[in-house]
Amino acid sequence: MIMSYPDPDEDLLPGFVPEEYYSPYRDTTIDEPVCTGCGQRPADIPVYAQLAADEGITPDEYVRRKEGTLNPRNGHFLCDEDYIAAGQPVGEHGTRWVAP
């Protein structure tokens, strides 16, 4: 029997993001992520500082691993407060939205 596996870079369902995208080894091109709404770094946002401490990692690493709005090309994301203020945007056809 030949097994075939879906291409991890292909959206299987609208809004589906392959698990590999959330890898802790996801590369970003900047040293520190920044919220484009408020301009703060993850360490300056209490919720990220607490969640990171709970997991035993830095706030920057927490955002790189877990933040759904993180743009891996430039490190931009929206913190929860700014994401809600922006109207909780979604990507085209219901896919994941990332900060510009």
Image (cartoon, rainbow, N blue to C red):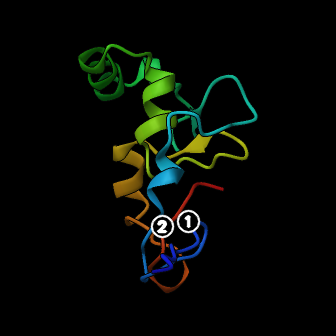
Q: Residue at 56% across / 65% down in the picture?
A: 8
Q: Is residue 5 above or below residue 69?
A: below
Q: Which mark is residue 33?
A: none
Q: Amino acid at mark 2?
A: Arg
Q: Is residue 41 left or right of residue 83?
A: right
Mark 2 surroundings within 10 Å by alpha-carbon count, few (fewer than 14), some (14 through 19), many (20 or more): some
Q: Residue at 42% across / 29% down in the picture?
A: 62
Mark 1 lies on residue? 8
Q: Is residue 41 above or below residue 35?
A: above
Residue 98, x across and y down, in percent: 56, 58
Quarter holding residue 77: top right
Instruction: Assign a secondary structure to mark 1.
Output: loop
The one nearer the camera, 93 or 24, is 24
Q: Residue at 47% across / 47% down in the picture?
A: 22
Q: Amino acid at mark 1?
A: Pro
Assign the C terminus to one quadrant of the image: bottom right
Q: Are marks 1 and 2 in contact (CB under 8 Å)?
A: no
Q: Is residue 69 visible?
A: no
Q: Is residue 32 left or right of residue 66?
A: right
Q: Is residue 60 above or below residue 83?
A: above
Q: Residue at 61% across / 67% down in the picture?
A: 9
Q: Which mark is residue 96?
A: 2
Residue 29, x across and y down, in percent: 76, 35
Residue 24, x across and y down, in percent: 50, 34
The earlier-in-sequence mark between 1 and 2 is 1
